[in-house]
Image: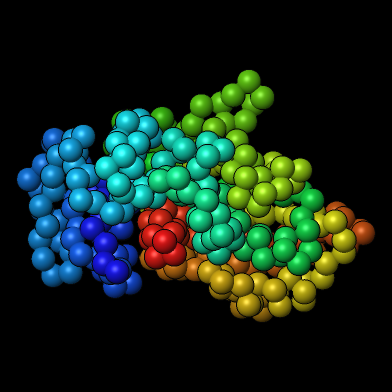
């Protein structure tokens, strides 16, 4: 079967990555429609050696479309996803609009692909940080149930979109030239700086990104009792998020057991060279499908042997967004 596919938000960073991945993986396309705002209508984007025109996103955009890959922002997904489903399409949505809807499966293919079968027209792509964390945590949890996850993220500018990536470059150039720089996309200068993730902080003191990691993990794992505490931070990296993950298991687990499980886990590559001091880095993770995992070690603060620490890096635009969506589409 070949699919009539539409990309909603085709001109953004994730939209561009979706185009690359559909081409690289040879997705069975019958037709491909690129949708964006009226400002981008008429623009052309490269795909498989051709230049495809961008069309304005309207309520009539989905006639004859089988699959919509949506990455145009939550408000547009809330408006247009139901219209696309009514027109007969299945929507894989990359925004937060439907993630916690109990009627919408939230899917990481390496974790809970069976949930795809329960969809009623919309399948949600999890938050990028949630995906990058849980690709390596899930295979461990299946064998040795995890009681608690404590995670600190080091999130790239790519998580805030193409404009934030450009702002990081401009800010670095300005600072190196001794000039002042006022950010417009991010709330603080990203170059040579680290700051708390730029999402709203709730009454419990956790920002939206941190809360997403907690709630989404419980839904994806079908494990409402798992404990998750997250601290999410922006760092001056172009793309690929990194995360420091501390796990508390219900029973003792050794480093060797963790390595054995992760070596066979889909979507994971172990990078853990202690002698050479070579571990996961965003430069290495960029433009890769796998989540890199290293610094695997027993947590010395848990003398019962139930603690493991590790450090991971994964491409936020790719596995954290576009690739995950295309993998879901392939499984459809």
Viewer-side residue, 322 vs 198: 322
Would you say residue 16 is visible in this rendering? no
Compared to residue 127, the image places residue 74 above or below, namely: above
Count the numbered circles shown: 0
Q: Quadrant of the N terminus?
A: bottom left
Identify the image's colour scheme: rainbow, by chain, secondary structure or one colour: rainbow
Q: Residue at x 22, y 44 (%)?
A: 62
Viewer-side residue, 52 vs 124: 124
Q: Quadrant of the C terminus?
A: bottom left
Q: Residue at x 48, y 49 (%)?
A: 119
Q: Residue at x 51, y 56 (%)?
A: 117
Would you say residue 329 is visible in this rendering? yes
Q: How far from the left and from the top, in percent, is residue 220?
A: 60, 50
Q: How far from the left and from the top, in percent, is residue 20?
A: 27, 64
Viewer-side residue, 200 vs 55: 55
Q: How far from the left and from the top, in percent, is residue 39?
A: 13, 36
Q: Residue at x 10, y 52 (%)?
A: 53
* Quadrant of the rendered image containing residue 175: top left
Compared to residue 38, the image places residue 239 above or below, namely: below
**Outermost residue, top direction?**
203
Q: Is residue 284 left or right of residue 4?
A: right
* Quadrant of the rendered image containing residue 305: bottom right
**Outermost residue, left direction?**
42
Q: How far from the left and from the top, in percent, is residue 160?
A: 39, 41
Q: Is residue 287 left or right of residue 269?
A: left
* Quadrant of the rendered image containing residue 185: top left
Q: Is residue 52 left or right of residue 104?
A: left
**Outermost residue, right direction?**
304
């Amino acid at each position: 079967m070949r699919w009539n596919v539409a990309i909603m938000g085709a001109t953004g960073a994730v939209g561009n990555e979706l185009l690359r991945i559909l081409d690289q993986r040879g997705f069975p396309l019958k037709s491909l429609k690129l949708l964006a705002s009226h400002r981008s209508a008429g623009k052309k984007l490269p795909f498989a050696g051709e230049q495809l025109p961008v069309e304005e996103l309207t309520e009539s955009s989905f006639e004859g479309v089988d699959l919509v890959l949506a990455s145009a922002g939550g408000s547009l997904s809330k408006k247009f996803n139901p219209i696309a489903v009514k027109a007969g399409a299945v929507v894989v949505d990359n925004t937060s609009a439907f993630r916690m809807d109990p009627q919408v499966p939230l899917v990481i293919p390496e974790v809970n692909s069976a949930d795809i079968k329960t969809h009623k027209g919309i399948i949600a792509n999890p938050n990028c940080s949630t995906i990058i964390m849980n690709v390596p945590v899930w295979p461990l949890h299946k064998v040795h149930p995890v009681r608690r996850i404590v995670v600190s993220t080091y999130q790239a500018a790519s998580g805030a979109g193409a404009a934030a990536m450009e702002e990081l470059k401009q800010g670095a150039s300005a600072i190196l030239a001794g000039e002042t720089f006022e950010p417009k996309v991010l709330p603080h200068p990203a170059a040579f700086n680290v700051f708390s993730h730029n999402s709203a902080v709730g009454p419990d003191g956790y920002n939206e990104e941190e809360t997403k990691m907690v709630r989404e993990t419980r839904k994806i794992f079908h494990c409402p009792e798992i404990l998750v505490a997250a601290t999410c931070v922006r760092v001056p990296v172009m793309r690929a998020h990194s995360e420091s993950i501390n796990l508390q298991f219900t029973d003792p687990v050794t480093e060797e057991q963790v390595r054995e499980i992760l070596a066979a886990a889909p979507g994971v590559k172990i990078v853990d060279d202690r002698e050479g001091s070579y571990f996961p880095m965003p430069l290495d993770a960029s433009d890769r499908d796998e989540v890199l995992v290293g610094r695997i070690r027993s947590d010395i603060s848990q003398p019962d042997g139930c603690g493991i620490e590790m450090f991971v890096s994964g491409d936020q635009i790719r596995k954290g967004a576009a690739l995950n969506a295309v993998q879901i589409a392939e499984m459809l």
